[in-house]
Image: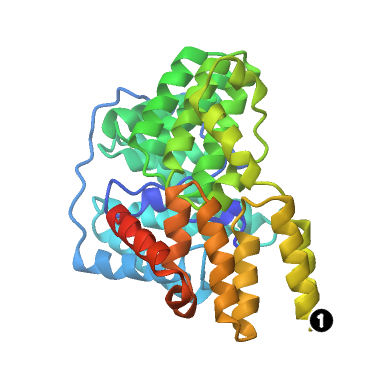
Amino acid sequence: MASPRFRLFACCVLLSSAAWAQQPPTTAPAPAPGRFSAVAPPRYVPAPPSPAARAALRLHQEGCQAEGFDDATCEKAVRQLEAVVRDDPRQLDAQLALADAVWNQAFRKPEGSAERARLRQRSLELYQQLVDLGVPDARPYYGLSVLTRDPDLRIGLLRRALELAPKHPEAHKDLAGLLLTRGQVDEAVREYRTHLSVRPYEGREDALEDIQFADRLASAGRVREASQVYDAVWDATGKEPRSERCQIFKAVELDPYERIGARFARELRNLRSACAGSPRLEGAVELERQGRDAAALQELERQIQENPVPAEPYLALQRLHLKQGRVDEAAEVMTRYFRQEKDPEERCRHFRTLSPRTTRALEPGLMNDLDRACRARRP
C-alpha cells in the first residue's frame, strides 16, 4: 500500500466537483504569510478541457496515481500538462493535475534530497498561483490547505473552499479538526455535523476517523456531543456485517455514554456478546491445516458452547462437514445458528451465502421462512 503522503490529491484533479480526496498534513513549507486573501475578486475564468488537456489528464490518471504510479508515464503526463497550461493558462483541470503529479513525483525522490524539496515546492507554488488569482473553484484552496502547515492559513483556505463548495465534506472535516484544536468547540461541532450530513460513507476508514473526532470531543468534556457523532457512526455502519462493526467499535469505552443514555451505547452493549474473541476457532483452523479435521470439529463445537452468538464457528463447522460429505450435519449446524440468531440482517446475510447443498438439506419450513423474510429485506 502506498505511503499516505504519496496518495493522490483526487479532489484537485477530478472533473467532478463532488469527488474529494483527503490527505494528511505534510511537512512541506507553508506559503508566505499574507499571500492568501479570502475576499480576492476572481480574475481567472476556467476554460473547458481542450482535447490536448483531456489526453494529458488521461495520462495523469494512468501513471501519476499513488496506486500503480509509473515514472515514465507520469513524466510524460507532466510534459503534456505543462504544454497545455503554456498554451492556455485557463485550463484549470490541467493545472490542478500538474500540481498533483509534481507532488507525487516528489515522493519518488530520496527523502531529504534537493530534488524532492524542489518538486514539493513547485507543487505548492502551482496551487498558490491559482489561489492568488482568486480562482472561483474550491479545489486549489482545499489542495493548498492540505499541503500547508500554518493553521491560520489552513483555516482561511478551508473557509474559502467552503464558500465555493458548501457541501465539500473533507473541508468541513478538516476545518472542524482545526477549530477543535484551537478550543472553538461549538463551531467545530457544527462543522463536523455538516461533514457527517454531506459525506458519503465509504467504510471503516471513515468510521474510525469519526470515532477519533468523537474521542477528542469527549476529552474536551463534551461527552453528549461525542455521543451524537457515535450515533451517526452507528447508523452509517448499519449495513455492515456484524464482525465489521465489532472491529470498528471494539475500543469504545461505553460507561460515560451509558450514563447519559446514549442510543449507540445501549445497542453496542447488546452487540458486544457477538464480538468476543474466538480462540478455539483459531485453534480449529490450525488443526484442520494439520489434517486433524475431527479435532477441529470438536474445538468448534466447544467454541459454540462457550459463546453461541458469533456466526463464524457455525460457518467453519458447516464447511468442515461439507468437506467430508456430511450434508445433513452441515444443515443441522446452520439450523442451530439461524434459530439462535436474533439480528435479521445477519440471518439474511448468511442465508444468502449458504452452500446450495446446505440450503437443500435445511428443514423446509425453516428454509421457506428464511427465503421469504430475506426476499422482503432486499433493497
Question: Quadrant location of residue 235?
Answer: top left
Q: How many marks?
A: 1
Using the rendered image of the protein, determine whether residue 276 is visible from the camera's viewpoint: yes
In the displayed structure, does residue 8 sit left or right of residue 272?
Answer: left
- Residue at the spot 58% in from the left edge and 17% down from the top edge: 223
Please tell me which residue is depicted at 40% across the width and 32% down the height of the picture: 195
Depicted 320 relative to depicted 206: above or below:
below
Q: Three-letter amino acid code at disc 1?
A: Gln
Frontmost residue, 59 versus 219: 219
Q: Quadrant of the N terminus?
A: bottom right
- Disc 1 target residue: 290
| Residue 128 seen in the figure | no
The spot of residue 339 in percent (x, y) is: 51, 54
Residue 9 is situated, as x and y percent measured from the top left of the image, at 45, 51
Residue 369 locus on image (x, y percent): 36, 59
Task: Please name the residue shown 44% across and 27% down the image.
Answer: 192
156 left or right of 163? right
The C terminus appears in which quarter of the rendering?
bottom left
